[in-house]
């Protein structure tokens, strides 16, 4: 079946411009995560959406970063006034609802990421 | 904050060797996830564990809840196993906390 889809796969932008990154999660998955990975570094948590609950924004590095998830499906990560340190691969992941520890056996599914380069 | 430590950071092995990658975490968790990131960035899920042991092909994952430690083993390693292996934990099935990854290079 279809996996997590991210677009664009690559984005080059000038410093100071705004960018939007899109994530289409697996159909029916209630949880959606945004992470970023700088060159040679590990995964950095950005934001988490779970169903209709208020998102966990604790990982967003500055107020230039925002994300929304419309209709509980597609999500958009927006970076305003991009800076060179924003250059990274932005990864989206989704997972199905957790209905109890004994039944939770479906892991995270990652998209292929958007490589953002700020020049 | 749940600190997740992986070791080693880098590992080079000869084809056929038995490989162990370790993950330790600092507080009680609900589940631990092993992921594989291939060169080029794609991340795939290997295992999700809350206790005991899981096996899939040449891969074996174990977790010791009391010791807050998990290991990922690869038997009869092959060059195609070369990748970054990432451990992630969650204590409420909300946010996942990631280790920094172990970069494995299996030489033919």
Image: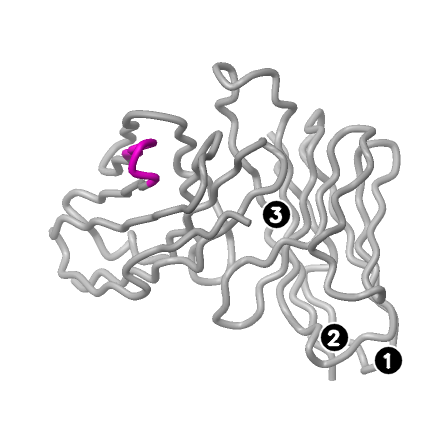
Mark 2 belongs to chain: A
Q: Secondary structure at mark 2?
A: strand
| Left or right: B2, with B59 as reference point | right
At x 76%, y 50%, the residue is A57
Given residues A83 and B4, the one toward you in this image is: B4
Q: Position of residue A56 (x, y in %)?
A: 74, 44
Reading the image, the residue beneath label 2 is A12
Mark found first going from the N terminus, 3 or 1? 1
Reading the image, the residue beneath label 1 is A16
Q: Position of residue B20 (x, y in %)?
A: 21, 49
Q: Is residue B67 magenta?
A: yes
| Left or right: A72, with B47 as reference point | right
The nearer-to-camera label among 3 and 1 is 1
Q: Is residue B75 magenta?
A: no
At x 27%, y 51%, the residue is B21
Mark 1 belongs to chain: A
Q: Position of residue B37 (x, y in %)?
A: 44, 54
Vertical side of B103 occupied by A13: above or below: below
Reading the image, the residue beneath label 3 is A111
Q: CA distance from mark 3 to mark 1?
A: 26 Å
């Amino acid at each position: 079946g279809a996996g997590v889809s991210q677009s664009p796969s690559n984005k080059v932008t000038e410093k100071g411009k705004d960018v939007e990154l899109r994530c289409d999660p697996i159909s029916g998955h209630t949880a959606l995560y945004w992470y970023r990975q700088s060159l040679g570094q590990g995964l950095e948590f950005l934001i988490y959406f779970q169903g209709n609950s208020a998102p966990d924004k604790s990982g967003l590095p500055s107020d230039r970063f925002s994300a929304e998830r419309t209709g509980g499906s597609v999500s958009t990560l927006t970076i305003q006034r991009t800076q060179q340190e924003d250059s990274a691969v932005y990864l989206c992941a989704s997972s199905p609802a957790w209905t109890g520890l004994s039944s939770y056996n479906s892991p995270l599914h990652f998209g292929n990421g958007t490589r953002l380069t700020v020049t | 904050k749940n600190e997740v430590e992986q070791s080693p950071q880098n590992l080079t092995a000869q084809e056929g060797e038995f490989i162990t990658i370790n993950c330790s975490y600092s507080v009680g968790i609900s589940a631990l996830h092993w992921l594989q990131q291939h060169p080029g960035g794609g991340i795939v899920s290997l295992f999700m564990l809350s206790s005991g042991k899981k096996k899939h092909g040449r891969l074996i994952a174990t977790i010791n809840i009391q010791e807050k430690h998990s290991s990922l083993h690869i038997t009869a390693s092959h060059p195609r196993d070369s990748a970054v292996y990432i451990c992630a934990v969650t204590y409420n099935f909300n946010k996942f906390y990631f280790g920094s990854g172990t970069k494995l290079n299996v030489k033919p």
